[in-house]
């Protein structure tokens, strides 16, 4: 029932916002709407945004548990010089986790917060890129944290020809200290490729799965490789631009007790200059 209620609320919220946008025909056909959709799909755009990305994961553990992860991911660009920007991005996970294994119990709370800082050209060419550090902080509650500080490089590159936006964001972090009671080492790789096709009225098709590898896990539990996609739209609530997206992904490769599939619903509030 928790799974059904959560999924219904997510879908209902998405289509409620979408229907609200449809009442404004002038906005829906406005070309700047499509341009803003492309800009919002650029991880190193000079654009303040506040995404709320909700991930509903199904059939986790031996108890076929439901795990919900709400990632709050504010992005704040800072102009360093005439030629360079610093794109500051935080990922703040709020997690609800059903009992995955017998006797474990449910848990709800904050996960480990991640900071990414991309140095990016203020006037990019055809290839847009950013490079910087990624820092993972052990802010999570019991059973929701690695209990380790972790640091490593992150990089993004993309192109935006015509109606398309496609690119790749990669990172790898290693533990650098902290923790209690000798927690396991951290060596974690992440690669997110994204392909978006933008249409009139701010509508777009998207696929943006995140491939991960836990290098400290057993060989059979190292990789998570999802496939899937969805659709989204940029519209306005009053005068505020909003990007709403709905997608689903199936894990073709995954650790033994990880989710088989997940549904991702995202609402992003945009603050263009």
Image (cartoon, helix red, strand yellow):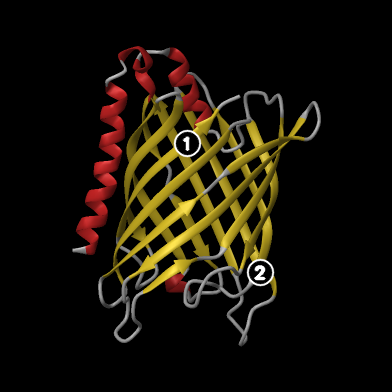
The residue at the point 47 percent across, 77 percent down is: 143
Q: Which residue is mark 2?
A: 149
Query: What is the tally of numbered marks visible in this picture?
Result: 2
| Image x and y of residue 8, in percent | 22, 50
In the image: residue 41, left or right of residue 235? right
Q: Quadrant of residue 13?
A: top left
Q: Is residue 230 visible?
A: yes
Measure the alpha-carbon separation of dots 1 and 2.
30 Å
In the image: residue 147, left or right of residue 60? right
Figure check: 137 above or below 17: below
| Image x and y of residue 28, in percent | 35, 17
Closer to the camera, 76 or 230?
76
The residue at the point 32 percent across, 81 percent down is: 101
The residue at the point 27 percent across, 20 percent down is: 23
Closer to the camera, 29 or 220?
29
Looking at the image, the residue that sits furthest to the right is: 81
Q: Which residue is mark 1?
A: 269
In the image: residue 15, left or right of residue 269? left
């Amino acid at each position: 029932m928790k799974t059904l209620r959560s999924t219904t609320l997510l879908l209902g919220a998405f289509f409620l916002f979408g229907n609200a946008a449809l009442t404004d025909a002038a906005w829906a056909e406005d070309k700047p709407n499509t341009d803003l959709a492309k800009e919002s799909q650029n991880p190193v755009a000079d654009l303040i945004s506040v995404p709320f990305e909700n991930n509903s994961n199904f059939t986790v553990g031996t108890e076929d548990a439901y795990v919900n992860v709400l990632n709050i991911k504010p992005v704040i660009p800072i102009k360093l010089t005439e030629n360079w920007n610093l794109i500051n991005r935080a990922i703040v996970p709020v997690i609800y986790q059903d009992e995955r294994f017998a006797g474990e119990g449910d848990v709800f709370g904050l996960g480990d917060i991640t900071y990414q800082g991309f140095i990016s050209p203020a006037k990019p060419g055809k290839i847009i890129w950013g490079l910087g550090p990624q820092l993972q902080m052990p802010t999570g509650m019991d059973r929701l944290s690695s209990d380790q500080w972790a640091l490593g490089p992150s990089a993004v590159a993309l192109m935006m020809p015509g109606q398309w936006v496609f690119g790749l964001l990669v990172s790898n972090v290693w533990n650098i200290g902290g923790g209690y009671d000798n927690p396991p080492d951290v060596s974690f790789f992440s690669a997110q490729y994204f392909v978006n096709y933008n249409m009139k009225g701010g509508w777009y098709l998207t696929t943006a799965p995140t491939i991960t590898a836990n290098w400290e896990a057993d060989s059979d539990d190292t990789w998570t490789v999802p496939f899937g996609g969805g659709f989204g739209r940029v519209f306005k609530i009053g005068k505020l631009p909003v990007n709403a997206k709905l997608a689903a992904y199936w894990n073709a490769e995954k650790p033994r007790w990880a989710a088989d599939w997940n549904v991702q619903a995202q609402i992003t509030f945009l603050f263009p200059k």
